[in-house]
Image: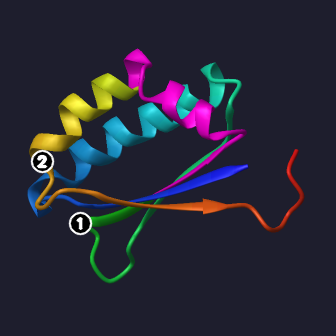
Amino acid sequence: MYVVLVYVHVFSDQIETFTIATKENAEKSSKLESGVVRFDVVQQADDPARFVLIEVYRSKEAAAQHKETSHYKNWREIAEPIMAEPRTRAFYTNIFPEDI
């Protein structure tokens, strides 16, 4: 599996907008993309304007295909202008649990 952690910091007055758009993207990714194993959205407890998207794909190619979907493009169009700073990413390979 191919794991991507996306770190996002949004303007504090845009938390709700970001949350709605991100939940929609995560839901559609999970339901419509066979290459998506898991798509979690977590919010930092002591700074609610900071989020981590935990995206687990079956392959690196599935992650690239995700960026071509209409729901991802819609999310990017909404989310990028309300970010307080550019998002960052870190890429991982799965150790445990076993790949499915």
CA neighbours of label 1 inside 10 A, class few (<14), some (14 to 19), many (20+): many
Q: Please tell me which residue lies in front, 91 or 74.
A: 91
* x then y, percent, for residue 44: 38, 74
* x then y, percent, for residue 88: 31, 61
Is residue 49 placed above or below 47 in the rendered structure? above
Is residue 74 placed above or below 81 in the rendered structure? above
Q: Label 2 belongs to which residue?
A: 82
Question: What amino acid is at disc 2?
Answer: Ile
| Residue farthest along the bottom direction in this orientation | 46
Going by the image, does 62 lie left or right of 80? right
The residue positioned 50% from the left and 32% from the top of the image is: 64
> Is residue 15 highlighted in magenta?
no
Tag 1 or tag 2, which sits nearer the N-term? 1
The residue positioned 18% from the left and 56% from the top of the image is: 86
> Which label was assigned to residue 58?
none
CA neighbours of label 2 inside 10 A, class few (<14), some (14 to 19), many (20+): some
Q: Label 1 belongs to which residue?
A: 49
Going by the image, does 9 lie left or right of 22? left
Image: magenta residue range:
53-71
Question: What amino acid is at disc 1?
Answer: Ala
Q: Does dot 1 land on a helix, a strand or a loop?
A: loop
Q: Does dot 2 land on a helix, a strand or a loop?
A: helix
* x then y, percent, for residue 33: 63, 23
Is the C terminus in the top left, top right, bottom left or bottom right quadrant? top right
> Is residue 62 highlighted in magenta?
yes
* x then y, percent, for residue 65: 52, 25
